[in-house]
Image (cartoon, rainbow, N blue to C red):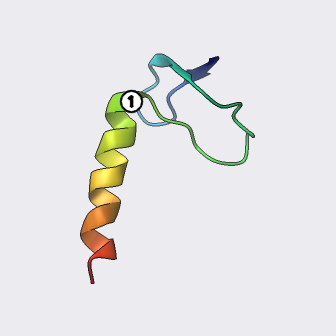
Amino acid sequence: MFDIVCDDCGKNAQVPFKPDGERPVYCQDCYRKHRQNNRRYNRY
């Protein structure tokens, strides 16, 4: 596991991959929120 700081809320969290520094990383709660928001637009 890799320690991260969530790019959305700033909380400390862990992810099972090494962040590449190019893309944002999110804690579990913010990741879910972003996935739900993206699904709304992918339906159409």
Question: From the viewer's perspective, is 9 left or right of 1?
Answer: left
Residue position for label 1 = 28
Query: Which one is in front, 43 or 9?
Result: 43
Q: What quarter of the picture does the N terminus occupy?
A: top right
Residue 12 position within the rendered picture, expressed as x and y whole percent measured from the top left: 50, 15
Q: Residue visible at 34% across and 62% down?
A: 38
Q: Residue visible at 44% across and 36% down?
A: 8
Considering only vertical position in the picture, is 28 above or below 23?
A: above
**Residue at disc 1, secondary structure:** helix
Q: Residue visible at 27% across and 53% down?
A: 36
Question: From the viewer's perspective, is 32 left or right of 3?
Answer: left
User: Could you tell me the amino acid type at mark 1?
Assistant: Gln
Image quadrant in which you'd find residue 18: top right
Farthest residue to the bottom: give it.
44
Label 1: how many residues lie within 10 Å, few (<14), some (14-19) or many (20+)? few
Considering only vertical position in the picture, is 26 above or below 14?
A: below
Image quadrant in which you'd find residue 2: top right
Residue 21 position within the rendered picture, expressed as x and y whole percent measured from the top left: 73, 39
Query: Which one is in front, 10 or 21?
Result: 21
Q: What quarter of the picture does the C terminus occupy?
A: bottom left
Considering only vertical position in the picture, is 10 above or below 32?
A: above
Residue 23 position within the rendered picture, expressed as x and y whole percent measured from the top left: 64, 48
Q: Residue visible at 30% across and 64% down?
A: 39
